[in-house]
Amino acid sequence: MAPRTDALTREVVDLIATVVARYHEEYEEAAAKHALTGAQAKVLALLARESLPMRRIAQLLKCEPSNVTGIVDRLEARGLVERRPDPDDRRIKLAAATPAGLDTAGRLSESLDFAREPLAALSAEERGALRDLLRRMLEPGA
């Protein structure tokens, strides 16, 4: 029989689940305002930070590379991303945000208020403590 979880742990897990659900809901709504699916918006956000091989995008999104190919195809058709050879290994194609893609990713990011509003109620010290606790929770073997 599995050990019982204490009430505080259950409450924390429920609160994290609520935060995640609300974030995903707002993310999908914000993406739709830019005529993007949530998956397209996530790929575009990744590529706004750096160009990536398709396989790495799939790893980061925890999905199949064939799914990423379709997402990148649709973003490329809209002029938001492009494929280019990897300068270190020309056999590998990188997906990269175009200037229009960078602009769209920036506007999308600016339109996400859910995380900013509740975090604004916390002091810088509290936000730092929350960040540090979340990082600890995500460490391998934690």
Image: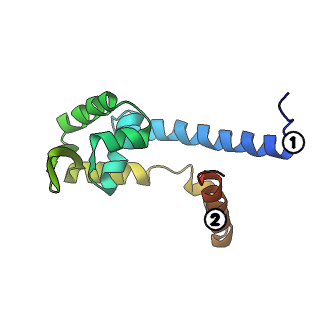
Q: Quadrant of the rendered structure where residue 135 is?
A: bottom right
Q: Quadrant of residue 58?
A: top left
Q: Position of residue 27 (x, y in %)?
A: 48, 41
Distance between the alpha carbons at the discs numbered 1 and 2: 24 Å
Regarding mark 2 in the picture, which secondary structure is present there? helix
Q: What residue is drawn where x is 31% and y is 33%?
A: 68
Location of residue 96 with respect to 38 vertically, above or below:
below
Asked whether 30 or 81 is in front, the reply is 81
Residue 91 found in image quarter: top left
- Residue 68 vs 127, above or below: the answer is above
Circle on res. 7:
1
Tell which circle, 1 or 2, labels the residue nearer the N-terminal end: 1
**Left or right of residue 4, residue 85 in this image:** left
Q: Position of residue 92 (x, y in %)?
A: 18, 45
Question: What residue does disc 2 label?
Answer: 127
Image coordinates of residue 125 in percent, x first then y, are: 66, 72
Residue type of the residue flagged with mark 2: Arg
Residue 60 spot, x, y in % from top left: 42, 43
Mark 1 Cα-neighbour bin, 10 Å: few <14, some 14–19, many ≥20: few
Q: The disc labelled 1 sits on which kind of residue?
A: Ala
Q: At x 35% / y 54%, what residue is drawn? A: 106
Question: Which numbered marker is on residue 40?
Answer: none
Q: Nearer the viewer, mark 1 or mark 2?
A: 1
- 131 left or right, relative to 45: right
> Looking at this view, is 115 or 33 the one in front?
115
From where the camera sits, is residue 13 visible?
A: yes
